[in-house]
Image (spheres, helix red, strand yellow):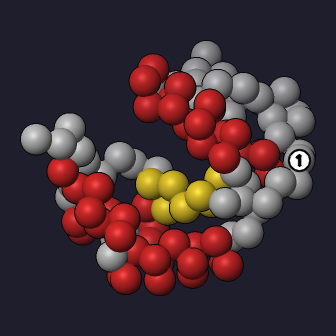
Amino acid sequence: MSERPWRYLYNTRRWHRLRTAQLRDEPLCRYCKALGKVTPAVIADHIKPHKGDEELFFDRDNLQSLCKLCHDSAKQSQERTGKLPGCGEDGWPLDPNHHWAKKGGG
């Protein structure tokens, strides 16, 4: 039995249309953009892991465009640890849940 039985969703026509629209509307990597870099995106990434939930899988608001490097490094690290590594050009953490990034905190 497959560890990820929802893999078939990535082969559907509906996903291919959604992925194409995502990359057309957001052609640059979101993580690189936060770092002040311009990198073409090649992956339509699920912000919140769907784990087979079709509603979440096909939710356009749950997608972001990433380059392969960011998807395979920063995003995977975030999914493992719950924290987005790195900081932007301004020096502030990229992770919106970082205590420095919270307004009025401290």
User: Would you call the spot at circle 1 few (<14 residues within 10 Å), some (14-19), or many (20 or more)?
Assistant: some
Work out whether 24 lies above or below 99: below
Tell me where residue 53 sits by quadrant: bottom left
Residue that extends furthest to the top in the rendered view of this protein: 106
Q: Is residue 59 left or right of residue 47?
A: left
Query: Residue 34's spot in the image, x, y percent?
Result: 78, 46
Res 100 seen here: yes
**Residue plotted at (72% across, 26% down):** 86
Q: Nearer the viewer, residue 52 or 9?
A: 9
**Residue plotted at (51% across, 72% down):** 19
Residue that extends furthest to the left in the rendered view of this protein: 1
Q: Is residue 105 left or right of residue 15?
A: right
Residue that extends furthest to the front in the rendered view of this protein: 1
Q: Locate the N terminus by quadrant.
A: top left
Disc 1 on helix, strand or loop?
loop
Q: Nearer the viewer, residue 17 or 89?
A: 17
Q: Locate the C terminus by quadrant.
A: top right
Query: Residue 60's spot in the image, x, y percent?
Result: 44, 72
Task: Residue under label 1, please give it.
Answer: 37
How many numbered circles are shown? 1
The three-letter code of the residue at mark 1 reads Lys
Tell me where residue 62 sits by quadrant: bottom left
Query: Residue 67's spot in the image, x, y percent?
Result: 70, 51
**Residue plotted at (26% across, 63% down):** 8
Query: Residue 22's spot in the image, x, y percent?
Result: 58, 73
Tell me where residue 55 sits by quadrant: bottom left
Res 95 seen here: no
Work out whether 1 lies above or below 84: below
Q: Nearer the viewer, residue 105 or 97?
A: 97
**Residue plotted at (67% across, 40% down):** 70
